[in-house]
């Protein structure tokens, strides 16, 4: 029945790629992995536009609310910073974030006292009451660098803003503005870390790091691995022996040890980790491509291209490599998952992505001690994120293997 269906599809002009796609869509775990990957990709692209904390690296610290549990809510007083802050465009904000023009003070209660607002600062579960006062004009406006004096005249305050422009504002209007816009209730859906940063925001930006490392590392490994494997498999002989000797030497070095060596040579950093992970993953690609090319080069159509006088470069790139895309796609998905795990491991050990840039591995390193201290969510949440991302790529890789494998075609 399946053979008859393939014959009908061939007669109807259905390509092998379309049949493979249909087989992939019938694989529910693979479809689930695709959905997770697409969702993660959308989150990574939108970035700071969807994070509660839009500051660069989502690094807005409020130390008074450190290590609070998921769904934690607190009342905050927004105090305007006395500095000029450029309003970034939507594209720049999406890519790099936007500096927050306010500092935030967590409070339990507040009251007005003539020209000041007096707040009872939130200090967690401790039975301590700490009151602080701020001038109302200083809460709402960015005041002048040169003239910090605020004068009270009748029922108004007179002061100069950061552009040295004089303002006279009624005290009643300031009170109304503060209550409406500067006292806000904020809920941290996934809680806060030990520095009082929003875990959800850092988790979202961490998606970018994982996907970026996976993509660049896989790209580097494919470029080197496909090139070396194709050359070795096509030319064979002495060239094959030399390339296989290099592959075997690198293959004999443990992956993490090789990554450590490359990282120490290149230095710690965001881009260095891409290169280090990519250079450690190309040997497996090269071995698979070599075997595929060695089998395809003996098929009649390759012999025909040689007889027609085509160059070796054209034969490899236009006639052999398109026929090994299936194994390349499968190993790319597997290497993507491996790259995410390696990056998380390196960040956990402190030699991967460096703070304040959020990385899921670094988030686990910062908070793994809290697992036994009563706040396990701080390490479990990024750990679950790593697990879901790696699982998604592994499911996709298994689905691609089944969809592109000739031996399993008749079962779909």
Image (spheres, rainbow, N blue to C red):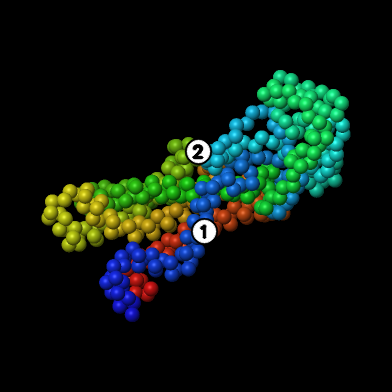
Residue picked out by circle 2:
268
**338 or 64, which is in the foreground?**
64
Res 363 visible = no
Left or right, 30 with reference to 10: right
* Furthest-bottom residue in this view: 1
- From this viewpoint, is residue 274 visible? yes
Q: What is the number of the mark on residue 290?
A: none
Mark 1 or mark 2, whichever is nearer to me: 1
* Res. 135 image quadrant: top right
Residue 77, position in %: x, y? 76, 40
> Picture coordinates of residue 342 (x, y %)?
49, 50
> For this view, does 89 lie left or right of residue 197?
left
Residue bearing the label numbered 1 = 36
Q: Is residue 267 left or right of residue 229?
A: right
Element under disc 1: helix
Of pointers 1 and 2, the one earlier in the residue sequence: 1
Q: Residues within 10 Å of mark 2 (few under 14, many from 20)?
A: some
């Amino acid at each position: 029945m399946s053979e008859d269906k393939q014959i009908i599809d061939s007669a109807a002009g259905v390509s092998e790629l379309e049949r493979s796609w249909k087989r992939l869509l019938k694989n529910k775990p693979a479809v689930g992995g695709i959905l997770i990957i697409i969702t993660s990709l959308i989150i990574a692209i939108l970035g700071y536009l969807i994070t509660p904390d839009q500051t660069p690296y989502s690094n807005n610290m409020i130390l008074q609310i450190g290590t609070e549990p998921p769904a934690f809510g607190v009342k905050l007083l927004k105090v305007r910073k006395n500095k000029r802050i450029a309003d970034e465009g939507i594209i720049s904000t999406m890519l790099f974030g936007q500096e927050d023009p306010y500092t935030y003070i967590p409070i339990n209660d507040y009251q007005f006292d003539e020209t000041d607002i007096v707040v009872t600062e939130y200090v967690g579960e401790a039975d301590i009451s700490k009151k602080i006062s701020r001038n109302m004009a200083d809460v709402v406006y960015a005041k002048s660098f040169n003239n910090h004096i605020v004068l009270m005249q009748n029922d108004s305050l007179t002061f100069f803003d950061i552009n040295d422009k004089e303002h006279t504002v009624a005290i009643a209007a300031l009170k109304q503005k503060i209550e409406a816009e500067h006292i806000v209730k904020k809920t941290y859906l996934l809680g806060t870390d030990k520095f009082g940063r929003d875990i959800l925001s850092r988790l979202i930006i961490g998606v970018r790091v994982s996907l970026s490392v996976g993509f660049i590392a896989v790209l580097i490994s494919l470029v080197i691995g496909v090139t070396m494997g194709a050359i070795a498999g096509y030319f064979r002989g002495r060239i094959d022996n030399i390339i296989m000797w290099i592959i075997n030497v690198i293959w004999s070095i443990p992956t993490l040890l090789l990554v450590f060596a490359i990282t120490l040579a290149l230095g710690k950093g965001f881009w260095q980790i891409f290169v280090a992970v990519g250079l450690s993953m190309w040997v497996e690609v090269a071995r698979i491509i070599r075997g595929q090319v060695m089998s395809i080069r003996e098929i009649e159509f390759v012999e025909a291209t040689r007889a027609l006088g085509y160059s070796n470069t054209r034969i490899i790139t236009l006639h052999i490599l398109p026929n090994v895309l299936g194994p390349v796609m499968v190993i790319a998905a597997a290497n993507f998952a491996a790259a995410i795990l390696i990056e998380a491991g390196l960040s956990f050990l402190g030699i991967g992505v460096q703070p304040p840039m959020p990385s899921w591995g670094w988030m686990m390193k910062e908070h793994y001690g809290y697992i036994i201290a009563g706040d396990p969510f701080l390490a479990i949440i990024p750990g679950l994120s790593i697990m879901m991302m790696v699982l998604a790529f592994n499911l996709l890789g298994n689905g691609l293997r089944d969809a592109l494998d000739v031996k399993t075609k008749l079962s779909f």
